[in-house]
Image: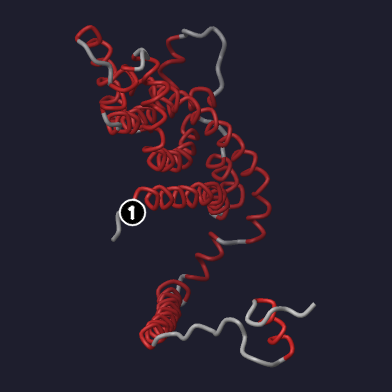
Amino acid sequence: MTPAPGSAAADRARAAAGTGSPPHEPRQVSDVELARRAFRKRQGAASVAVSIASTLVVAVLAWLLIINTPGWARVQQQFFDPEIALASLPRVWDGFLLNLRVLAMSAVLVLVFGLLLATLRTLRGPVWLPLRALAAAYTDVFRGIPLIIVLYLVGFGIPGLQLIPVRMPTEFWGTIAITLTYSAYVSEVFRAGIEAVHPSQRHAARSLGLSHGQSMRLVVVPQAFRKVTPALMNDFVAMQKDVGLISLLGAVDAVRAAQIETAAYFNFTPYVVAALLFVLLAIPTIRLTDWYTARVRAREQIGGIV
C-alpha cells in the first residue's frame, strides 16, 4: 500500500530514500543567541583562568611563608611525623569513640531540653510567669558562663554533694555539662523559630478545635523546626568540637589520649591526629548544612526573581 502524498509517512519515506527534504528543517539560531553563547564561553574560560591563577598564587605564598621558612623542617618533625601518627592512632581513636558517645547523648538531650525551654518561654498568660522567668534566667546564666567553668562546676561540684550514691564516670558528668550549656543556645534558636511562625497559623489551628498543646505539636513546632534547621546544624558542628573539653575532667578522650601519646613520644603529632579526626567528623555535617541552607534559600526564592 502506497502512502498518501503529503502525509507524514510519505515524508519519512522520502527522507529514508534520500529524496525530498526532511519533514522538519533545523531551527536557525539568531545572531543574538550566538553572541550570548560566545559571551558565556568567554566568561567561562576567564573564570577558569582566574581560578588557576589564584590557586597558584596561594600555593606560592604557602611555600614562601611556611615551607620555605628556616624552621619548617623542625616543625614538620615535631607535628607531622608519619610513624608517630600511625603509632598513636589506635589510642587516640579509642578516645575519639568516647567523644562520639558523649556527642550522641548530648545531641539528643540538647534537642529535647532546648525545645522544652523554648516552649516554656513562649507560654502566654500571667499564670505562666514563674516558668517563663525560670527559663529566661536559665538561658541567661548558661549562655554567660563559659563551658569550661560549667564542666568544672558540674564535674567536681555536683559529685561533692554526694547526691548519687554510685560513683558516676566522667563521661556522664561531661554529657550533663555540655547539655546544660548548649540547651541554653538551642532553646533560643527554637524560640526564634516558633516566633517566626505567623500568628495566623495558631489562630487557624485553634479555630479547628485544637488545644494550645496540640497546636504547638502539630502546627507550630514542625514549621519552626524547618525554619531553624540550618542554625541547629551549625550548633551541632560547634558541639562536635566542644566535646573534646571533657578531657578537663580526666576522661581519656581523643584530646587526653593525644596528650598521653605526646608525653610518651616527646612529639606533638598525636594532637594533629586528634585534630584530623575531629575535622573528618565535622566536614560531612558542614557540607550537609551548606546544602540544606542552599536548598531552603532556593525554595523560598522561587518566583521572587523577575
Residue 198 at x, y = what percent? 27, 31
Residue located at (44% from left, 13% from top): 160
Q: Amino acid at mark 1?
A: Gly
Residue located at (37% from left, 50% from top): 297
Residue 136 at x, y = what percent? 25, 21
Between 20 and 40, the residue placed more toward the observer is: 20
Task: Establish if 276 lies above or below 201.
Answer: below
Neighbours of disc 1 within 10 Å: few (<14), some (14-19), many (20+): few
Numbered disc total: 1
**SS at badge 1:** loop
Q: Is residue 72 visible?
A: yes
Q: Is residue 207 left or right of residue 17?
A: left
Q: Residue furthest bottom?
A: 19
Between 167 and 36, the residue placed more toward the observer is: 36
Q: Is residue 1 left or right of residue 72?
A: right
User: Which quadrant: the C terminus?
Assistant: bottom left
Question: Label 1 belongs to which residue?
Answer: 303
Q: How is the image coloured?
A: secondary structure
Residue 88 at x, y = what percent? 64, 49
Between 42 and 256, the residue placed more toward the observer is: 42
Task: Establish if 302 lies above or below 137.
Answer: below
User: Which quadrant: the N terminus?
Assistant: bottom right
Q: Is residue 215 left or right of residue 82?
A: left
Task: Establish if 28 lies above or below 85.
Answer: below
Between 21 and 36, the residue placed more toward the observer is: 21
Q: Residue furthest right?
A: 1
Q: Is residue 60 visible?
A: no
Residue 291 at x, y = what percent? 47, 52
